Amino acid sequence: MAITSLPAFFILLSTHCYITAFAVILRTADKNPWVNEFDYVELSCLIESISTSNPRIEWKKIENGKTSYVYFGKEISGALKNRAVLRQPATLVITNATRSDTAKYRCEVVAIEDEKSFDEILINLVVRVKPVVPRCSVPQSVPAGKVAELSCVEEEGFPKSKYQWFRNDEAMPEDPKTSPKFLNSSYTLNPETGSLKFSSVRKEDEGEYYCRAVNDAGYSECGPQMLEVYHINVLLIVLGSLAVGLVLLCVTVGLCCAYKQGFLPSEKETGSNYASPERGDGVDYARTDEEGDFRHKSSFVI
Ligand SMILES: *[C@@H]1O[C@H](CO)[C@@H](O)[C@H](O)[C@H]1NC(C)=O
Ligand SMILES: *[C@@H]1O[C@H](CO)[C@@H](O)[C@H](O)[C@H]1NC(C)=O
């Protein structure tokens, strides 16, 4: 038993030694580093094992399916030129990261004197960008009971900003029902889009509103803006319309009466209307008031 298993043991031992002695093996301290924009970051590429004395080291950037050189022929190239250095043995150090550095980076080491002469390691770098001041829109004045829509947009932040709204310096919960202060408010708040919408705004919703755009790198706020809520008094509107209607009615009736009683200038006096002869009726009415005048007029017509 012991004798048959002995060669297997030797093979195992020799394979192990063989790998450690004649293979290049890489390792990283951080596969998913992140950094705030304009900060320093290391893309660590450590050589765990190597026999070759002068290995070829390359760094490539992989972004949107395209691969470009970052470190090649012992020089930094491309967009990282003057912003990065190689630190022995193979770590890439970016001294002033920008948002466009967000990408995958591949450290490749070729060691021709090793049996396993190639190894590579992929590193995913995220450069976080602090949000800029968001663009906020708050309606100045909204009638009570109507829809009011507030919006907040920020597009520089990376990862993409999320949004918080404040009323009179107080954070508004995503769901108004979770806070006694906002319990009866009709709003819905979308932290992904920045929209704050009241389906039926109340006088209590009046106040100074501002929005905050937040991500992992920090936050920015817009200045507070006043939302005013006014009441449309329905009773006043109804009474007002009634009053106007009454006045119009009185004027109409008054005009009719005045016309019928002959207080308005009659076309008869112009003498240029076909209706003139029929005005005799109108003159009859006048008779009750001033008989003398009627006679005078009658004789005049005849
Ligand atoms: C980093 O780069 C930005 C713009 O490219 C520049 O404004 C800033 O001064 C740089 N920071 C350092 C520490 O070099
Ligand atoms: C909410 O409405 C209820 C009933 O209409 C009322 O009793 C309560 O006081 C209101 N709460 C607030 C905070 O306005």
Image: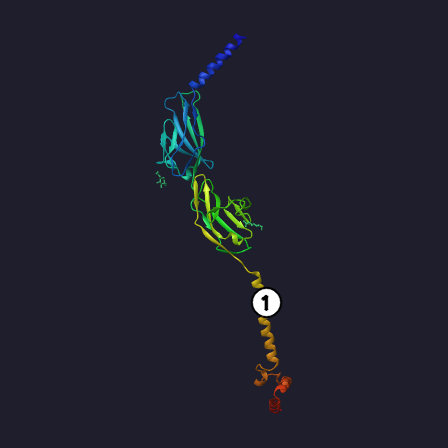
- Residue 92 % position (x, y): 39, 31
Q: Is residue 162 above or below residue 118?
A: below
- Residue 198 % position (x, y): 54, 51
**Residue at image point 58% right, 64% down:** 238
**Which residue ends up furthest to the left in the rendered image?**
82
- Residue 64 % position (x, y): 47, 37
Residue pointed to by mark 1? 242
Q: Is residue 237 above or below residue 46?
A: below
Q: Quadrant of the N terminus?
A: top right
Determine whether the residue tagged by mark 1 lies in a helix, strand or loop: helix
> Few, some or many C-alpha atoms within 10 Å of disc 1 (few <14, some 14-19, many ≥20)?
few
Q: Is residue 71 left or right of residue 273?
A: left
Q: Is residue 235 left or right of residue 72?
A: right
Q: Is residue 172 above or below residue 274?
A: above
* Closest to the observer, 94 or 132: 132
- Residue 159 % position (x, y): 46, 40
Amino acid type at circle 1 is Leu
